[in-house]
Image (spheres, rainbow, N blue to C red):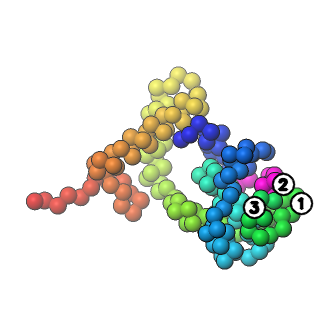
Amino acid sequence: MAHWQDRFLGIGELPGELSIFEIEFFQFSPRDIAAIRKEFRPKYRIAVGLQLGFMRLTGARLHAFNVVPRKLLNLVGEQVGENAPSIASLRSMYRRGNTRRDHQAWVMQWLHIKVHTKRQERMLFSALREASKAIGSIDRLSLVAAAKQGMDTVSQVLARGELSIHEGNIAPPTRSSQ
């Protein structure tokens, strides 16, 4: 995980200000724009664009109902061909929670992000518990580094073929007897 991403770990809301670098995640390709325009009614296009940019930036779903920065509203609105409201919050864009969840599901599918399984979640928490035993105090950066190291170890084991992932489950690979 890049150091700049640390500030987004575990958040579900837009920060009050985004840097120029962070705003780049809300710059959409022609393919993104075409898909948004095809799949969603005009009144939801800006909301979906915000979900898409936020998930690219953080890897998380945008849940909070805080006010969206005007500059970001304008940027997303211009790209999807809609007029941005002068003031908007996610609450005003989503009158129904199901609509927000549907948009988040579409964005995850569009970005090829899969929801982790309960087993994967238990494995990660177990690795974090083990890593936290070695830490004398709660230090967020140390925990982030330990989590990354644990995930890197899992990735290396998968790459060596010692484990395989099948339908979201991690298991030893099946080998045919020769």
Q: Which residue is mark 1?
A: 86
Residue lying at 61% horizontally and 42% vertically, measured from the top left: 5
Q: CA distance from mark 3 to mark 1?
A: 13 Å
Q: Residue 145 appears at what percent x and percent y? A: 51, 34
Q: Which residue is mark 2?
A: 70
SS type, badge 2: helix
- Image quarter hosting the C terminus: bottom left
Lower sequence index among marks 2 and 1 = 2
164 shown above or below 85: above
Q: Is residue 131 left or right of residue 94?
A: left
Q: Is residue 109 above or below residue 116?
A: below
Residue at 41% x, 59% y: name it: 168
Residue nearest the observer in this picture, 45 or 21: 21
Q: Position of 99 compared to 124: left or right?
A: right
Asked if one can make out residue 7 in the rendered structure from this viewpoint, the answer is yes
Q: Earlier in the sequence, mark 3 or mark 1?
A: 3
In x, y percent, where is residue 11?
66, 46
Image point (39%, 63%), residue name: 167
Q: CA distance from mark 2 to mark 3?
A: 10 Å
Q: Give the image location of residue 72, x and y in percent.
A: 78, 55
Numbered tag placed on residue 76 in the rendering: 3
Instruction: Tell me the chief SS of the magenta region.
Output: loop
* Residue 62 highlighted magenta (yes or no): no
Q: Residue at x 44, y 37 (%)?
A: 149
The three-letter code of the residue at mark 1 reads Ser
Q: Residues within 10 Å of mark 1 (few under 14, many from 20)?
A: few
Highlighted range, magenta: 63-73
- Mark 3: amino acid: Val
